[in-house]
Image (cartoon, rainbow, N blue to C red):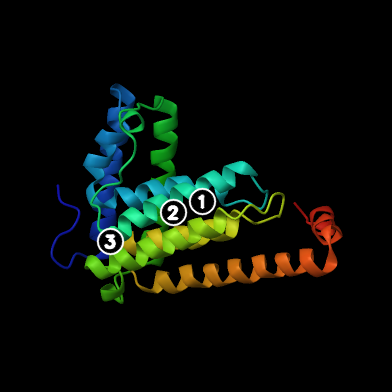
Amino acid sequence: MSLRTEAPSACNRTQALLGILEECVDRAHHHNLSLNAAFERLGDTSFSFICIVLTLPFIQPVPLGPLTVLGGLNFMALGFQLALGHQTPWVPRKLKSAQPPRRVWVAMLRSCEWILKLCGRLTKRRFTTWVTGVRGRRVCGSLIFAGGGLMAIPFGGLPLNNALPALMILFACIAELEEDGLMLIVSLFWGAVSVAYFAFAIYALLFLGAHALDWLQNYWPF
């Protein structure tokens, strides 16, 4: 089954991918499913699939410490590969052959299905030249790389330091997956919010001292 046909509608592409995810869920239920097998089945959408799955734990206001930096580095690697035109993500051989537990697979796949169904209601094919072909992969890959770079900045306990860049990455993936150029603008918006927020945090630390961060942590509602 090919995910990319000539001028497919966003609905058709979403339904095709949902069908593939259901096949992966069924296989995970009855057989061992390796990352490599999932990548091969998902084809050129595997970048978006991986990044969407990886963004889910980071879209929360609570900082995750070193995990945020590690996640940012992973996003940078995936975005760089996508921008270079790789068809499927390169991961170490041992990781590629790994077979996550059935419950983990099902949870990840079901989460992606939920996101795809939601996206199917909010997105459509528009400004496709921004997100298709070599140019589209470079643009989306660059945004994922940039979001990963922002996430990798070691801000310690700063609230939202993982959530804002993760939203930038998420919408870049949605743009590539649904061929919706408008989602690139949403991704850039969250990137701008991330930069402004981090710039304010740096300013506060430089000119107001460490008490500024303590105040933000103490009065943050989460």
Q: Is residue 175 above or below residue 104?
A: below
Q: Which numbered disc, 1 or 3, marks the residue that appears first in the sequence?
A: 3
Label number found at residue 140: none
The nearer-to-camera label among 3 and 2 is 2
Label number found at residue 72: 1
User: Which amino acid is tagged 2?
Assistant: Met
Query: What kind of element bears circle 1?
Result: helix
Q: Are marks 1 and 2 in contact (CB under 8 Å)?
A: yes
Label 1 Cα crowd, 10 Å radius (few <14 / some 14-19 / many 20+): many
At horizontal 14% and vertical 47% (from top left) the residue drawn is 1
User: Which amino acid is tagged 1?
Assistant: Gly
Q: Is residue 200 above or below residue 99?
A: below
Label 2 Cα crowd, 10 Å radius (few <14 / some 14-19 / many 20+): many
Query: What kind of element bears circle 2?
Result: helix
Q: Is residue 222 above or below residue 10?
A: above
Label number found at residue 76: 2
Picture coordinates of residue 59, whole percent (x, y) = 57, 52
Q: Is residue 4 above or below residue 183?
A: above
Picture coordinates of residue 39, whole percent (x, y) = 27, 41
Q: Which numbered disc, 3 or 2, marks the residue that appears first in the sequence?
A: 3
Q: CA gap, disc 1 to disc 2?
A: 6 Å
Decide if residue 78 is on the left or right side of residue 194: left
At horizontal 24% and vertical 52% (from top left) the residue drawn is 44
User: Which amino acid is tagged 3?
Assistant: Cys
Label number found at residue 11: 3
Picture coordinates of residue 25, whole percent (x, y) = 32, 34
Name the quadrant containing residue 35: top left
Decide if residue 220 is on the left or right side of residue 70: right
Please tell me how many numbered marks the rendered image carries.
3
Q: CA gap, disc 1 to disc 3?
A: 31 Å
Decide if residue 168 is on the left or right side of residue 205: left
